[in-house]
Image (tube, rainbow, N blue to C red):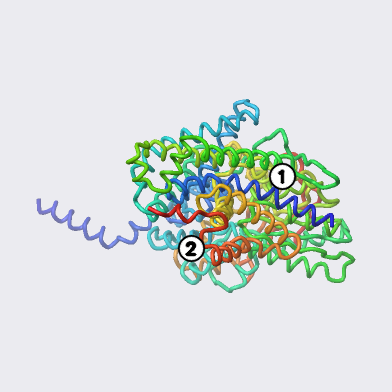
Amino acid sequence: MKFGMKVAATVLVSALLSGTAAFAQDPVKIGVVLPLTGPTAGYGKDGKMGAELALEEINGAGGILGGRKIELMYDDEKGTPQDGVAAVQKLMTQGRVKAVIAGMNSSITLAESAITKNKVLHVNPGAQADAITEQGSPWLFQVNNTASTNSTIFHKYLIGTLKPKTIAYMGENTEFNKAVLENLKRSLEGSGTKLVEVANYDASTTDFTSIVTRLKAANPQMLYVVDAYPARTAQIWKQIRQQGGFPMEAHSTGTVQASAIVPAEGAMEGVVTGDIFIAEGATGEMADFIKKFQAKNNVDPNKVSLVVYEAVKLIAAAMDKAGTDSNYDLISKTIRDNVWKTPRGSLAFDAKGRAKAPYFYIQVVKGKDVALRESFEVK
Amino acid sequence: MDLLVQTIINGLILGSGYALVAVGLTIIFGTLHIVNFAHGAFFALGAYAVLQLENAGIPYLLCIPLAVIVVAIIGFVLELTIVQRALYDRGEHGSIIITFALSQAIVAAIVLVIGPDPLPVKSPFGQTAISVFGFFISAQRLFIAGTSIAVLMGFSLWLRYSIKGQQILAISQNPKGALYSGINVPRLRALSFLLGVSAAGLAGGLIAPLISAFPTMGDANVIVAFTVVILGGLGSIGGALLGALVIGLANSMFETYVSVSWTPALGWILVIFVLLFWPQGLLGRPELNRH
């Protein structure tokens, strides 16, 4: 009996002493904020499939930090900055997540990054506006290219290779659009191409007939549309097609997915765009990723699935390598100091936390997807 | 000159489409004094009903009336279970919260059942555009404009000349008085609600081929519809048409000649301006608010 008491006491004391060790086997919670409803809910669906695949792979390989599993906690940003902020706050305070993945829409991500700044590790998978990583948040990282990196290559192609004499521009009044338009104006300097019309419309616009009429009146050789909302993108191109279209047509980089092409019902055929991902002709790691994704979800991955997958993998790998889930200075330093293997190739992050995709693909809409026109190595 | 004519055509065609979205809102407000924030959700239901019926192999033009019936049935159930119990004679604040909640619930249900992605709705008019003297009109838009004017005229005539229509007008002016005169107030209120949401469903089914079906498709359209009915006068069908044409024309003129960025504010600026000088809206009837 006495012996039994002793054992019990020892067990109790050692349990108390090793409290931290017991906690160490708790899962590492990562918050994933996506637009699960609202006009960009398609991105949320695609992103979630990418996150789940990464989760399965990480936990299947035994987890991180000596056997701790990863747990993903989702919340819905509903496509608005205020809902995005609320979702991030909820995950940080109630969910007690160790890292936040948030960033599909630039204006929303900008609002969210104000909440995560100096508080928690934040990885922005998809949003492109330069302003997000411009603010000098030490624990904020971006997996996708910035709008200016993508646009610089894309605009060089539009102006230098396609050589239109005149361009008309239309885009939704957002942070992303602002970055692209500024870049376009810079790219046009000293070229023989003129920007003849700019139409920045509001998110509540439901009909584009008059805008297209106005742009047609300027008789440009190329129409350039900048919009990241799939439903609206489809709608705009349908209405452009009804009015006979333009000799050359382009759509902003990183925003043309099947969720826009399919409902456009052929109206986007031939539209030139560009992205950091293309399924066509994938080899090596990328082919593996596509195969695993298809096996799990029965659909092809797209750019959104890929970047969210990469964001989860990056956080897990960096925490594991740094040996901590909450020393964000160390984790951030680890992210900056290392090169990370992804399906796209090697990703390195600069001082501002921006990754540069190894490749950029000029694409053209063909059937229900995009086809590769030309690929560039990003320098 | 060509640009001006094309702009005016764009505006009028667009405006008649707005009228169709707005008419249901104005009927429900005029009769029930409910500001129906779920209007956009019924709009989306109409579009999804057309989509599902099309997927079952039914031609688009037949899908439209069937979809209206589907929306009417959903509207009937919701009226019976929620609207009737919670809203009538309870003031407008309750109606805002409950119809808003209803709208969120319907949108969430669509996301759950069908999914969030925008889906194409096929119409025989497709992407075709008609060219009249060199001016372009989208065939689908023209179809919407025609239907819209027919529906608005039908509603107007029915309200004015049929017994049920007159009873509805009586209820809108004085529900108690109507009840004491032997009018079946609950049944006619239900009928007005059904007509209102069916009109939203019809608008959704007609506009879906232009904008695709997605769960929150009603949001932006209903914002415009609200400006239209406030401008035209809440509760007035003629007002809804006039308001819609004014806003359609103003939007397209402004977009073509002034600034695209400022266009969304234009409708509301017009609303403020009109309300300052005609507090009931352009064709609103002051007696509607007499209880």
Q: Is residue A336 left or right of residue A149?
A: left
Q: Are marks 2 and 1 in contact (CB under 8 Å)?
A: no
Q: Earlier in the sequence, mark 2 or mark 1?
A: 2
Viewport quadrant of the C terminus of chain A: bottom right
Which residue is located at x 13 percent, y 54 percent?
A5
Q: How many marks?
A: 2
Residue A277 percent coordinates (x, y): 69, 51
The image shows residue B190, relative to residue A154, as above or below, that is: above
In-front residue for pair B3/B289 = B289
Q: Which mark is residue A283?
A: 1
Res. A54 in view: no
Residue A242 percent coordinates (x, y): 77, 44
The image shows residue B61, relative to residue A3, as above or below, that is: above
In-front residue for pair B18/A264 = B18
Q: Which mark is residue A85?
A: 2
Q: Which mark is residue A188?
A: none
Which class describes the residues within 10 Å of circle 2: few (<14), some (14-19), or many (20+)?
many
Res. A126 in view: yes
Give the amino acid type for the residue marked by disc 2 in the picture.
Val
Q: Chain of mark 2?
A: A
- To which quarter of the image does residue A338 belong? bottom right
Q: CA distance from mark 2 to mark 1?
A: 38 Å
Q: Chain of mark 1?
A: A
